Image (tube, rainbow, N blue to C red):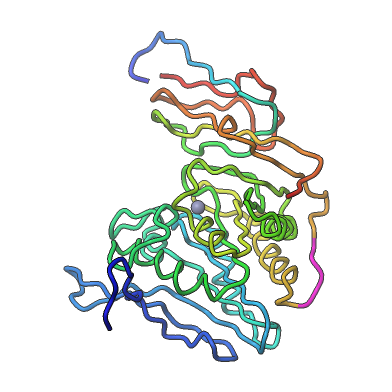
Amino acid sequence: MTLQPNQLRPSPISATVDFDADGVQHGFLKLPISTDESAWGAVMIPVTVVKNGEGPTALLTGGNHGDEYEGITSLLKLSSTLKAEDVTGRVIIVPCMNTPAVMAGKRTSPMDKGNLNRSFPGDPNGTVTSQIADYFTRVLVPMSDVVLDLHSGGRTLDILPFGASHVLDDKAQQQAALEGAKAFGAPYAMVMFELDAEKLFDTACERQGKVFVATELGGGGTSTPQSIAIAERGVRNFLIHYGLVEGSVEMPEGGQMYLDMPDASCYVQSQHSGVLELLVALGDEVKKGQTIAYATI
Amino acid sequence: MTRSGTAPVAYKAERDGILMARRAPSLINMGDTLAVIADVVERLEA
Ligand SMILES: [Zn+2]
């Protein structure tokens, strides 16, 4: 094979599953690595494909950050229960996108310190994390119609449970994602403002015209019965909403609250080192000018 | 934290809304996101 200048070589990752075969397959995305511990080794990223005839393709991802457990837990469970006869089309489940980070229980990969969700679109000749990003960008995302990427706060944040979409130039694409974010059926739905969207998985999907829904579902480096229940119901709702699974979408009993993040003034960032005292709890109302936290320096 | 007798520094909300996210660990460094405030809206439309 001859590559033109600026043309990327194919991804070094190979899949042990056949994405075009009907039925349920469990396998791996294999990335060759060569380390002190394994000269001819591979990073093994678990993948499940559930396909039944013609229909849309949904890509469900967790563990983009390795310490966000609602996605990892709910998608690992789904991978062992979803049956081909329950599906119209194809569901691709990757519960631990950044497997090395998940195995370390950390946001970033111990192999290269890579933050997968700051590594897109990725590079087939880059670091391990960048090579994983590239495989999603050039292989899995093009196969997909709708993408659900399950995040939580991780060890350093605690976040209200919500489904989220972004403001996009293509309003039909934006509307389709917003409807999915609502249909996820978390207690909150949100249009999210990102601090720097350029290298996100979100942006890599949206630039290919895909319908992309993200979530935040708690945090603190753990999960709760409530947050897992929201994640599991949400994944099911997502598949029902986009026509992959039959059933009716279940919304939260108390109704759904809509949130908007118009700009960067939503973020309160520290200008001190010290001890944090928050004066308000998650979900509390605050007013402009209200003291919401102390830093004891 | 490194000396006594210093009053805490107050952080204020720059907008109305609800506390949507908070930092989990109590130890903080410069640049850390301490809190995120989101607007509560009646409708969300594209
Ligand atoms: Zn995350």
Q: Is residue A230 above or below residue B46?
A: below
User: Is the stretch drawn in magenta largely helix, strand or loop?
Assistant: loop
Residue A37 vs residue A247: left or right? Answer: left
Q: Is residue A59 above or below residue A150?
A: below
* Residue B29 colored in magenta in the image: no
Image quarter (top left, top right, bottom left or bottom right) of the C terminus of chain A: top left
Question: Can you give x and y, in whole percent of width and height, for residue A262 in the image?
Answer: 64, 36
Instruction: Report which quarter residue A263 is drawn in.
Output: top right
Question: Can you give x and y, in whole percent of width and height, for residue A148 in the image?
Answer: 60, 63
Q: Is residue A277 above or below residue A75?
A: above
What residue is at 75 percent from the left and 60 percent from the top?
A183
Relative depth, front residue between A164 and A263: A263
Instruction: Report which quarter residue A182 is drawn in.
Output: bottom right
Image quarter (top left, top right, bottom left or bottom right) of the N terminus of chain A: bottom left
Task: Please state the total of marks drawn on the protein image.
Answer: 0
What residue is at 48 percent from the left and 54 percent from the top?
A200
Question: Can you give x and y, in whole percent of width and height, for residue A104 in the image?
Answer: 36, 59
Instruction: Report which quarter residue B35 is drawn in.
Output: top right
In the image as oriented, which residue stretches furthest toward the front?
A: A4
Question: Can you give x and y, in whole percent of width and height, for residue A129 in the image?
Answer: 35, 61
What residue is at 53 percent from the left and 59 percent from the top?
A207
Q: Which residues fall within the magenta stretch?
A: A246-250
What residue is at 51 percent from the left and 39 percent from the top?
B24
